[in-house]
Amino acid sequence: MKEKRGFTLIEVLIALVILTVGILAAMQLFPASLRQSRAAAERTQASQLANSQMSRLRAMDIGQDFARWVDNNTLDTLSTTGRSYALYNGWSTTVQRTGADSDTYRVTFSVQMLDGRRENFVTYVTRR
C-alpha cells in the first residue's frame, strides 16, 4: 500500500504568512498610486490653465491689451464655489523686462495648488 503524503500544518501556516505579507505589501501601493494620480490631475489642470492664459497673452501685442491682461492677472483667487470645481486656489502673474533697452518681457505664471504648492510656468513675450 502506498503512503499518501500531504502538507503539514506548519507548511500551510508558513505559506499563508508569506501570502499575507505579499498581499499587505501590494495593498500599500494603492494609496500611493491614488496620491500620484491626484497630483498628476492637479498638475494637468494647472498646466492647462497656464497654457490657456499664456496663449492669450502671446497673441496680444505689447501695449494696452498687455497692460490690461497683466493688471487682471496679477493675483486671482478662486471663490469657494470655484474651488469646489477646480484643483487649485488661484494664480498670480509677475512680469519682468529682460533688459533696459529690450522690448522682451519674462512672464511667470504661478498657480497656487490646494495643498499650498506652487506650479510655475514661464514664457517670454515681445513686440511683433
Image: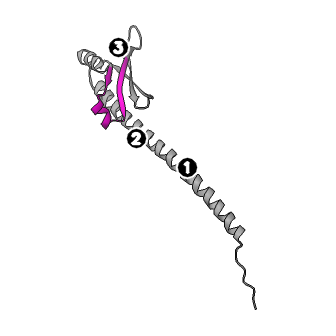
Q: Is residue 23 above or below residue 75?
A: below
Which residue is label 2 attached to?
41
* Element under disc 1: loop
Which residue is label 1 attached to?
28
Identified by mark 2, the residue type is: Ala
* Element under disc 3: loop
Mark 1 Cα within 10 Å, few/some/many (few <14, many 20+)? few
Left or right of 29 in this view: 16 = right
Magenta stretch: residue 96 in it? no
Q: How far apart are the alpha carbons under marks 1 and 3?
A: 53 Å
| Of 93 and 82, the residue lying toward us | 82
Q: Nearer the viewer, mark 1 or mark 3?
A: 1
Instruction: Residue 57 in the image: state x and y as whole percent.
Output: 30, 24
Q: Earlier in the sequence, mark 1 or mark 3?
A: 1
Instruction: Residue 123 in the image: state x and y as whole percent.
Output: 39, 24
Which residue is label 3 attached to?
103
> Which residue range is magenta in the image?
75-94
Q: Residue furthest left?
A: 64
* Element under disc 2: helix
Residue drawn at x 30%, y 30% as measured from the top left = 80
Residue drawn at x 38%, y 33% as measured from the top left = 46
Left or right of 118 in this view: 17 = right
Q: Nearer the viewer, mark 3 or mark 2?
A: 2
Residue 112 location, quadrant: top left
Instruction: Residue 116 in the image: state x and y as whole percent.
Output: 44, 28
| Of 12 and 55, the residue lying toward us | 12
Residue drawn at x 27%, y 33% as measured from the top left = 81
Mark 2 Cα within 10 Å, few/some/many (few <14, many 20+)? few
Magenta stretch: residue 91 in it? yes
